Amino acid sequence: MQFKVNDFRFIDGYPKIDKLDAGNQFVVVNITITNKSNKKFDYDSYFFHLDDDGKQTDTTESPYNVTDSLDSGTLRKDESTTGNLVGQANTNHQLKLIYQQDTNLNKGKITFKLNQE
């Protein structure tokens, strides 16, 4: 499998619709997944988490102004999918995107540093 973070950005939500925790903004991560193997690969947005200085949260937020969410599906050999994952975090914190399909086994964990030098 090949995972590529294409872009990430912070956005404000719409105050009357979107619910942000105090001091947070939405974090939109655009990612592409490509199946380079000969086997089918199942993906799901629930396999991704946003790590905000050690606090992990889901990336399944849905602010009104973000489209093209990464959902779930199956990729055959050489197929790709691209979509947005959205969480919320403090813009001053160190952020990571974490992929882990099986949290019980603690294996296959991939970490993407988003705003670290």
Image: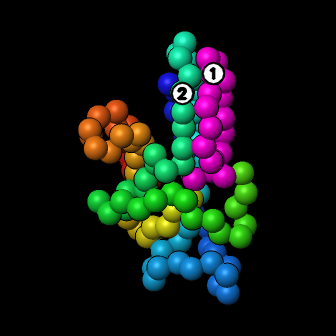
Where is residue 39? Give x, y as percent. Answer: 53, 17
Q: Amino acid at mark 1?
A: Arg
Q: Is 72 in the magenta?
A: yes
Question: Does any portion of residue 115 appear in the rendered image?
Answer: yes
Residue in the image at 60% along x and 43% along y: 72
Residue 3 is left or right of residue 98, and the answer is right
Question: Does any portion of residue 6 appear in the rendered image?
Answer: no
Residue farthest bottom in this picture: 16
The residue segment tinted magenta is: 69-85
Residue in the image at 67% along x and 81% along y: 17
Question: Quick one: label 2 or label 1, which is nearer the N terminus?
Answer: 2
Q: Is residue 86 above or below residue 36?
A: below
Q: Nearer the viewer, residue 7 or 87?
A: 87
Residue in the image at 50% along x and 25% along y: 1
Residue 97 is left or right of residue 18, and the answer is left
Rendering colour mode = rainbow
Where is residue 96? Give x, y as percent. Answer: 40, 51
Q: Which residue is mark 1?
A: 76
Q: Is residue 41 above or below residue 73?
A: above
Q: Is 96 in the magenta?
A: no
Where is residue 46? Give x, y as percent. Answer: 49, 50
Residue 49 numbered tag: none
Q: Quadrant of residue 104?
A: top left
Residue in the image at 66% along x and 24% along y: 79
Q: Which residue is mark 2?
A: 41
